[in-house]
Amino acid sequence: MTVAATPDLVAAATAAGTAVLAFNVVSIEHAEGIAAGVERADSAALLQISENTIVFHGGRITPLLAACAQIATESTAPLGIHLDHLQDMTLLSEAINTAAALGAGSIMIDAAHLPYLANIERTRTLAGAAHAAGLWVEAELGEIGGKGGAHALGARTDPEEAAAFVAATGVDALAVAVGSSHAMTTREAQLDHDLISRLAGSVQVPLVLHGSSGVPDGDLRSAVEAGIRKVNVGTALNIAFTGAVRDALSASPSAPDPRPYLKAGREAVSDTVAALCRVVAVAPAGKVGPR
């Protein structure tokens, strides 16, 4: 199977009244675990590589992106690749120039830390370049909490402002602040479902929910029913991975081979992914989720 195109996955989810899950990749083990979990759930998803992960890998986009593309190609599930939360201008330029050729179908231009008009200007300029390179473009408005500094916890995206932002920038999807927060280790977020519905009615592009690891299953389903079409998950995978690694190391503290504990981490990621796919892919009555 070839790498799936992000707009195709999102369009299929939109038509079915569901959402595409986008899972953060930190290592090859994450990517393999995500692919296995999506296959087990008979679903579709995005392998998502963030700026923080690129920095972790020495600032190099190509190695992990190439690995994800190969994993997606060999998977029996429809898997696309998305570059997430890119802020650094040098990295954005490199990604726009090279990502499509390496297998990525979409990119998030994150200028939400800037004032509203500056966010519009930077996003519009970079979105034009990304579109010319064949990339589907996501942006953020509302400063979703949990990233530190620029992202204000408790912020909410205004529907009228969101509509104007999308019209001015030409982006293909919009990440909105509706009550979730990045990096939550407990599932206690309370989403504003009425706001999601109003945003979906105001904005003519798919809505994206960031910080979904902190959202309970029922709230995730309700958010999708209200209009969320892409659901980002990162922290939940890391909790599963590191927990399994800790357990494996505790059971064999003197074992020199990393493969057993990396395998345990990979399997924990797969279990978490499969469970979340089953939660989000549950379509409203009379509709069928993406397959």
Image: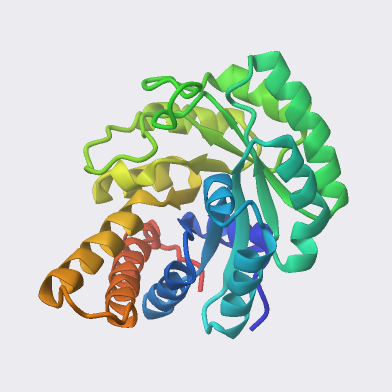
Residue 167 in the image: above or below residue 126: above
Q: Position of residue 222 (x, y in %)?
A: 33, 44
Residue 251 in the image: above or below residue 187: below
Q: Quadrant of residue 13?
A: bottom right
* 127 horizontally vs 265: left or right: right
- In the rendered image, the quadrant that contains the N terminus is bottom right
Q: Position of residue 40 (x, y in %)?
A: 37, 79
Residue at the image position 29 percent from the left and 43 percent from the top? 215
Residue at the image position 62 percent from the left and 34 percent from the top? 110
Q: Quadrant of residue 99?
A: bottom right
Q: Position of residue 24 (x, y in %)?
A: 47, 56
- The front one of 66 and 11 is 66
Q: Position of residue 206 (x, y in %)?
A: 59, 43
* 170 horizontally vs 159: left or right: right
Residue at the image position 25 percent from the left and 44 percent from the top? 185
- What scheme was used to colour the molecule? rainbow
Residue 104 in the image: above or below residue 119: below
- The front one of 194 and 263 is 263
Residue at the image position 59 percent from the left and 28 percent from the top? 202
Which residue of the protein is positioned furthest toward the left in this rendering?
251
